[in-house]
Image: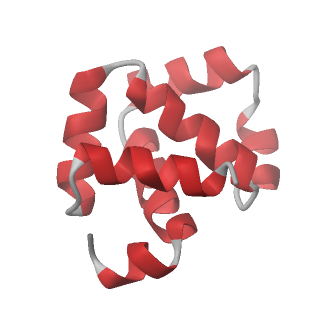
Amino acid sequence: MRDEQTNDPEAAALQALGWTLSDDGRADRFLALTGLTPEQLRGRIGERSLLAALIRFLEAHEPDLVACAAFIGITPLQLVDVRRRLET
């Protein structure tokens, strides 16, 4: 895992959020499943619970989890570990 993600799980989760929102369909699914509006998402962007929920969303669709982890430069298991750390 890159050093910045090792020391700061929020950094990896924010990168995952950026990746998720880069695709309109994926972004729409995330917003629909969470019930958030884009404005609410912007207001909660730094909340650990929201970032953990985002990674859980990716975990629910393995191809997205794998692609997002590759984009960030970590393994899917490391991305799952990021979520676990955010939930503590």
Instruction: Answer above or below: position of 78 versus 12.
Output: above
> Which residue: 34% across, 19% down?
61
Residue nearest the observer in this picture, 55 or 30: 55
Image x and y of residue 28, in percent: 53, 22
Instruction: Answer above or below: position of 39 versus 35.
Output: below
Number of marks in the image?
A: 0
Task: Indicate left or right for 17 with 87 as reference.
Answer: left
Instruction: Answer above or below: position of 60 versus 67.
Output: above
Locate residue 77: give its quadrant.
top left
> Which residue: 27% across, 60% down?
72
Task: Indicate left or right for 31 with 80 as reference.
Answer: right
Task: Indicate left or right for 10 with 75 as reference.
Answer: right
Residue nearest the observer in this picture, 77 or 29: 77
Image x and y of residue 70, in percent: 17, 51
Image x and y of residue 79, in percent: 37, 50
> Which residue: 63% across, 16% down?
33
Instruction: Answer above or below: position of 49 versus 57.
Output: below
